[in-house]
Amino acid sequence: MNAPFFGWFQIIRLGLIQACLGAVVVVTTSTLNRIMVVELALPALLPGFLVAWHYAVQMVRPRMGFGADKGQRSTPWMMGGMVVLGVGGVMAAWATVWMATEPVYGALLAVLSFSLIGLGVSACGTSLLALMAKRVPDERRAPAATAVWLMMIVGFAVTAGVVGKLIDPYSPEVLLQVSAGLSVFTSLITALCLWGLEKNVEPQAVSGLSEANERLQKQDFKAAFKEVWADPAARTFTVFVFMSMLAYSAQDLILEPFAGAVHGFTPGQTTQLSGWHHMGVLVGMLSVAGAGSRWVAGRLGSVQAWMVGGCLFSALATVGLVSSALSAEWPLKANVVFLGVANGAFSIAAIATMMRLAGQGADGSGRGREGTRMGLWGAAQAAAFGLGGLLGTAASDLAHALLGEQRTAYAAVFGLQGLMFAVSAAVALRLRQGPAAQRTLLRFDGPVMLKGGSSS
């Protein structure tokens, strides 16, 4: 028998867990970053390295997902991951305070702390997505992905605001107290959200037939990973995730400097520009969710069409940024909003596609390896985000050195970013035309499959 599908109550509980995860991460990657650079006058390279390191640690995501597959329950991995994340967050705050008197020892402790943060995010985040892939029905995947990610963004915003008020004026003692309180609070919320979430699932029922379940249990991680990697759709989607997220993250560290250097925006205006981009992302996410509702009934196209279209329009928007680099008359704000809408649309469509593909194999029988597949794609995303900021700023510096003039240099960087989005669209289109996608093409109007498919 198959596990029962989740309703909106269970999906909102998963969203709360994602919000808790984001709450701890935002303090370690933004608040501690500022304290290291401003209050402690440490090189900005240090927090930059720590953030990159926590992404590098997330290369263990496939192994974490395999562990959840093996145990056939995601709850222990999500709860354990949140606890490890919370411990890492408190240790990171302690390391930051220690840096004031012992910079070397504090930095070493920070490396260990960010290692725990990466491990916690990997265990909790991968298992959460794998559980969604198993238990969220087809017609709810795009709206569910939007809801969960919006709750994570709300977790970012609320935590940043509350923590900012609590630690002002700054003191090491207050920082430690707030960090410890946040970790305890998020762990308790996660425990409450997980209580009874998988109670209706018998372990032997998750993977279907006992013979298939026995084979999965006997596999080690290496064999399971090879099986997943042997699926052409899984490999193609891995390339898509890496390329699209690399292009997406590359703009983060160069958009505001570009607006200031080329268009003369003040620091406040560049911050507002980023806000307009995030607003556009929100509109794009909600558009995909709306297109996924049962009232629209598939008239706005498939998830894959939104994924391909979102990448193409992202490429078009970056071409607009090239024009804005060459012409001061170009409407930069409108261009940035358009870029955000396209980014939000393709990212949510990609998450919905990820949930669909997680339960498929080369022969359409990939049940039982959802965690391993989600881990593979999560690792690709982490690698892209870790490299994106570095490559974006490095490409900008290189273009300035070679071309000498700011407008031309930024135009070249945005052109490269547009090319990456275009390649991502081509890869997504190839995925759409693959045999697995042809068998089980997900439509927005519900669990309606093409001939030979299944609605499970």
Image (cartoon, helix red, strand yellow):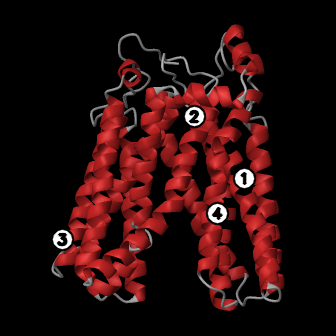
Q: With respect to residue 157, does 441 lie above or below?
A: above
Q: CA distance from mark 3 to mark 1?
A: 42 Å
Residue sitting nearer the eye, 186 or 76: 76
| Residue 297 visible in this rendered orientation of the protein | no
Residue type beneath disc 3: Ser
Q: CA distance from mark 3 to mark 2?
A: 39 Å
Residue type beneath disc 2: Arg
Q: Residues within 10 Å of mark 2 (few under 14, many from 20)?
A: many
Q: CA distance from mark 4 to mark 2?
A: 22 Å
Q: Is residue 101 left or right of residue 4?
A: right
The residue identified by callout 3 is 323
Q: Residue at x 78, y 72 (%)?
A: 108
Q: Residues within 10 Å of mark 3 (few under 14, many from 20)?
A: many
Q: Residue at x 21, y 74 (%)?
A: 324
Going from the N terminus, do you reach mark 4 or mark 2 first? 4
Going from the N terminus, do you reach mark 4 or mark 1 first? 4
The residue identified by callout 1 is 119
Tag 2 secondary structure: helix
The answer to whether the residue labelled 3 contacts the one labelled 2, judged by CB atoms less than 8 Å apart, is: no
Residue type beneath disc 1: Leu
Q: Quadrant of residue 105?
A: bottom right
The residue identified by callout 2 is 373
Q: Which mark is residue 226?
A: none
Q: Is residue 402 left or right of residue 219?
A: left
Tag 4 secondary structure: helix
The residue identified by callout 4 is 53
